[in-house]
Structure formats: C-alpha cells, structure tokens
Image (cartoon, rainbow, N blue to C red):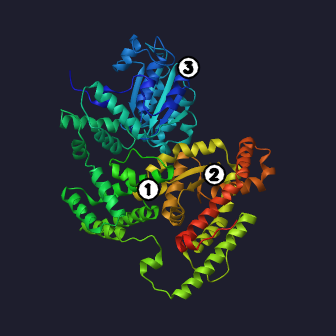
Amino acid sequence: MAYQALYRKWRPRTFADVIGQESITSTLRNSIRINKISHAFLFAGPRGTGKTSCAKILAKTVNCLNIKDGEPCNECANCLAADENRMSDLIEIDAASNNGVDEIRDIRDKVKYAPTEGKYKVYIIDEVHMLSMGAFNALLKTLEEPPEHVIFILATTELQKVPATIISRTQKYTFKRIALDAIIARLKQILVAEEISYEDKALQVIAQVADGGMRDALSILDQIISFEKDGVTYADALEITGFANQEKIEELFLLLTQQETGAALALNKELLAAGINPQNILNELVELATQVLISQKTKTKSSAFLTNELSETVESLDNRAILYLIDTANEALNDLRFTTQQNVPLDIFCVKVTSFHPAGDEQQSGRQTDTSEEMQELQKQVQHLSQQLGALQKTGVVPRMKSATTTGASVKSTVASTNLKTKYRASVYHVLKHATKDDLSRVKDVWPDLISKLEVSQRAMMKVSKPVAAGPDACVVAFDYQLWFERATSDSELMKQLNDGLTSLTHANTEIVLVPKNEWPILRADYLKTHKAELTNRQEVDETETAAQADEADNSQSKDVVKNDIIEQARQLFGDDMIDVKD
C-alpha cells in the first residue's frame, strides 16, 4: 500500500476527534441530534484548523444509517463509502480550479436530482472565495432555496472576499487557530500510536512553527520522521524548520536584559555563524519578550520558556527594559531592509539594549544639576503631585497643572494622559451608548485573526490589548501598557490596518477606539453614572446595571489605580525616602 501522509492518515473521523474547535463541533452535533440541519453552512478560518474535516464529518453524519448522539457510526455502508471517497452523494469541489459560471450552473442543474445512497446530497465547495462574481451570482438563488435533499457546505480562508449576499444565506462558523498545548497533545497522541519516540522540546518547536494549524504541524512532523526515522529530536526539528535554537535565544535575551554587552555580541556571532538569519533572531526576540510581558502581567509561568533560568527571572525583569528591547528590535528589523551587511543592525541593536538605563532621561544623558536647585525642583514636583492626589480623592479626576515647573517625567505623563482621555472620552461614550454583548462577541471572535495579519512588530504591540466593549459601528480596545497605547494611537498606518481589517472580518464598518486599561473602568463607571436614564429602556440594561454596581462598589479601587500609578511614578522619580503619602 502506498504511503499516506500523516495529516491524511490521522484526519478526524468524528466531531470528537476535531482538536481546538469544541464550540463548533458541539453545535453541529446538537443540530444533527435534534434534526435541525441548515441547508447551507459557511466554515471560515485560518488554514489547517479543521474546516474541511468538519465539512466531511458533517456530510458523512447526515447520511449515516446509524447516527449515535450526533456522531457517525463509521461502520455502516455509507460511512465507509464516505471515508473511502466513493460516495456519489458527497461532491467535493475545489473553487480555486472550478471558479467559473459554467461549473456553478452545472451544480444548479444537478441539485434537483435526488440522492442515490443517502438521505442528503452534500456539496462541499472549498476555498469558495475564489469563485468569480458571476459564479457567486449563479449560486445565489440555489443557495437560498435548494431542494430539501441538498446541503451546501462552503469553506474559506478569506471570509472578507465572500459577498455579504452569500454569507447571509448560510450558517457561519468561524474556526480559530488551535492552541499550542492542543497541538502538542495531538502530536504526542499520534507519535505514541505510531510507536515513534520524541523529545518534548521538538514538539514545542513544531507547534510554534505551525502557528495554530494542525495540518501544518502534521506536515512538519511527517518531514522530520522521514529525515530521521529513529525518533523526533529537538536538533532535527531545528534543522528541518529553520527555527533558531530557542535556548540560545533565551540566553541572548537574558544577556541583553542583564546588560552583558560583550557576551551578547559573542552569542550573536555564534548564531550568525550557525547560519541563522538576523531577521529570525530579532523576530524571535520580539516574540519571546512579548511572552515575558504577558507572563509578568498574568503572574503565570509560561510553557513557552525552555530554560529554567529564564522562568525563574521573569518576575524580576524590568518591563521598561523589555519594552525598550522590543522597540529597538523593531528599528533593527526596519534597518535590515536597507543594508547588505545584515550583522551590523543586529550588533547595533545589542549595544543599544545593553546600554539602556530605565532610571530616567537625565541619568542616561549624564546631565549634572546643582544640588540645591535640584532639591527645589523636586520639592515643587512633589507639591504638584500632592495637589493632584488631593483633587483625585475629592473628584476622581486629575486636573491639568498650570505651573511651568512641572517638567518631571511623571507629571508630564499624567498631564498627557489626561489630555488624551478628554480626546477619546466622546468616542468611548459613543461605543457604550450602543454596546451589546453580541457585538463584543463578534469582535472577540475575529480579533486573533486580525492580529495574525499584522507584521511581527505590530503583532507584538497588539498582543497586550483586547476588546472590552463593542457596538454595531465601533469597539473599545484596552491596552495593558500606557507606552504601547500611546505608540499605537500615534501610528496612523497601524490604525488604518486595524480598522480596515476589522471591517473586512466583521463585514461591518467598525472603528477601533484605543484606551489604556487602567482608565477603562473609570470611563465606564462615569458613563454609567451620567447616562443611567438612557440605559433603562435597552435590552442590555440588566448587564449594564450589574457592571455599574460593580464599578460603583469598587469605585475607590478604580481611583486607586490612578492614584497608585501617580505614587509609583513619584517613587521612580524621587525615591522611597522622599515620598510620604497622606490620605
């Protein structure tokens, strides 16, 4: 018997076998169980996430002679015929090569004939977005009112290219990228069944390179097994995938954050001598730094870290230094595009990062100031901070200071934040006025796909953000870090990509409003307090009231977020000995 690729051999045969799409498979299984099966389905999502597999399982199940709890029996004549691709009532069409009007007209002419073996005649049209506009128009009427014995299943990786008239005539299911842990678990299951030894770190590399696609992961695994049949090793995985040695990347990351310039440059030279591309090194450093920030924020140990040294030191790393590393890496990636000496931007990047001092601009520039004048200036800044805290305790709002002496970094940051807040307050209020739970779910469903379409540097920036409220024409996205919120807000190209991408994925003209995460609960609480009367007639009033009560009950905590932020900035600027906080 001819060799069969792993992704074909291990293609799921039941809904329970499908990895990472539990919400979709359970819905499909329930619809079959209660015999409420739609005439048309649209499966959309990234490649290798189970769209075609679910389509085949659905087609097989509706024609199974002995359906068991919404699953195919895989034993009857129809199930066996479907698994062996010899069932005449199951028609698969590749729209990439059959995208003309004539092919669709042929389908339209044949749908009137009854199935010969099963209960339904099922048409699976893969990559449906490749159909011409004429072909879509020819499909419209048949898709809207097909005969009772016909089911259409459309699959696509580019939902934004499918006309809205087609989408509205189908039940749409959005497939998500499969989680890293789920891919690794599936690979282990297959290797155990195939009686092939493996190293855990090798599977980690395969899953990372696969980028959420199960089929890609199995194809890489197949290639490694062909390369070395004795087992799947970490070294083989690195060689086949071209993935830089993750342990070396983690070692380089630690050297950079610990300001070991000489050792970092030496390791750079070693990685380049091993044939690793500088662009790959920088990209992996950005990805790793992002994982470190997320791990710090969530207070959890990330499974992405391979060395114990990094896992143990994550919490002690200064997040300002990590953010600077990411920014500098992005600059180096841009410089690589304009030079033939690829090692130079990488070396400059190392020197810059290891020379970074997060204590403040004045310390970095070595500026010397007269002691008495410096103390007077510091005392004035402390006085301004105290006034801000007093105003905050009374009104919950930090006023803009008029004094010209507020030149410290912390005061500038607070004033800038207040000015920005007044600019986006109206936009946030507009979203909250029309916000619904369904709109937020709609945005959250496509958010990972939107982020995946960005460049590595932009993706790293947006990974610390998430949608927190949405209406029919706009959504609010909160940023964990003030620095990246300001950077994203000022990046007009990034904002255009986000708005255009979200509009394409949701098929609605949706504008994105960015806010810092620490200011979001305050803005929401203010809105709920001042617009309570307008909310009473809305369907979402119960949920909104609940949120309002929670915010009001914890109003002091919301204020404390801003208050503590000011105090922390003061500590960084003046030191603990000079700060005396009075309530």
Image position, residue 129 (x, y; %): 45, 40
Three-letter residue code for mark 3: Glu
> Would you say residue 491 is visible in this rendering?
yes
Vertical placement of residue 68 versus 514, above or below = above
Q: Gap in Å between the C-alphas at discs 3 and 1?
A: 49 Å
**Lateral position of residue 26 relative to residue 292, left or right:** right
Image position, residue 513 (x, y; %): 60, 58
Q: Residues within 10 Å of mark 1 (few under 14, many from 20)?
A: many
Q: Which mark is residue 473?
A: 2
> Which numbered disc, 2 or 1, marks the residue closer to the eye?
1
Vertical placement of residue 528 versus 48, above or below = below
Image position, residue 368 (x, y; %): 46, 86
Q: Gap in Å between the C-alphas at discs 2 and 3?
A: 37 Å
Q: Residues within 10 Å of mark 2 (few under 14, many from 20)?
A: some
Vertical placement of residue 486 versus 158, above or below = below
Res 275 → quadrant: bottom left
| Disc 3 element | loop
> Which numbered disc, 2 or 3, marks the residue closer to the eye?
2
Q: Which mark is residue 221?
A: none
Three-letter residue code for mark 1: Ala
Specify the quadrant that holds the C terminus.
Answer: bottom right
Three-letter residue code for mark 2: Asp
- Whichever of labels 3 and 1 marks the residue nearer the N terminus, that label is 3
Q: Residues within 10 Å of mark 3 (few under 14, many from 20)?
A: few
- Whichever of labels 2 and 1 marks the residue nearer the N terminus, that label is 1
Disc 1 designates what residue?
460
> Which numbered disc, 3 or 1, marks the residue closer to the eye?
1
- Whichever of labels 2 and 3 marks the residue nearer the N terminus, that label is 3
Res 202 → quadrant: top left
Disc 3 designates what residue?
148
